[in-house]
Image (tube, rainbow, N blue to C red):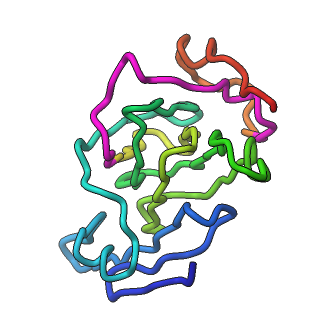
Amino acid sequence: MSSPTSPTFRACKTLFDDVVLLQRTNHEDARGSFGKLYSDKIFIEMGIVIGPFKETIYSLSSRDVIRGMHYQQAPLECSKLVSVVKGSIMDVIVCIKPSESGRDYGKSYACLLSARNCRSLLIPSGYAHGFRSLEDETIVVYNQTADYSKEHDKGIHYLSFGYNWDLAEPIISDKDKNLPAIAVP
């Protein structure tokens, strides 16, 4: 994929062909800042087709919280657009979709998303997603193409795919601590 641009967004390549890092334009003045997290029209013009969003979710996290690694299984798998509106995170995804070559399965990609750097990550289905909060009171916004379903909510253990979280004592939910390891083919 080339790196399509608009006055509002610039798409940047990542390790995976179908995952897009978006650089957003932010306008600042004496009042503060203003910007777009998503525009269906602009994304379509850029050749980025994600499908309609069904819900928007947010999380508020303290420093050193790890949330993840989550995904929804079929038939309610979903794509996500992840943005940070306050604070910063190290956003992490791991490929969990089988492919004919199997070359990407189990590989991870991480990037810094923050209110300051105005980046968002567009994650299609087929990836488990999580993040480490780097600041107190970090607010992450997720636009998702499927409604949350407890029945289809799945995950993999955050330490099972070789990513170095660089954190000795993470704050993590009991649910996430007890997720299974990624299955190695």
Of 46 and 75, which appears nearest the observer? Answer: 75
Do we see residue 137 in this rendering? yes
Q: Is residue 131 left or right of residue 106?
A: left
The residue located at (42%, 43%) in the rendering is: 138
User: In which quarter of the view is residue 57 placed?
Assistant: top left
Vertical placement of residue 42 versus 148, above or below: below
Quarter of the image that includes the C terminus: top right
**Camera-nearest residue between 121 and 97:** 97
At x 77%, y 48%, the residue is 102
Q: Residue 158 versus residue 113: which sits nearer the camera?
A: 158
Q: Is residue 98 left or right of residue 102?
A: left
Where residue 183 sits: x, y (%)? 74, 26
Quarter of the image with the N terminus is bottom right
- Give the camera-side residue of 127 and 119: 127
Q: Which residues are magenta?
A: 143-164
Q: Residue at x 72, y 28 (%)?
A: 182
**Residue 42 position within the rendered picture, expressed as x and y whole percent measured from the top left:** 28, 78
Residue 107 located within the stretch drawn in magenta: no
Asked if the stretch drawn in magenta spans residue 157, the answer is yes
- The correct choice, above or below, for 73 with respect to 82 in the image is above
Q: Is residue 93 left or right of residue 159?
A: left
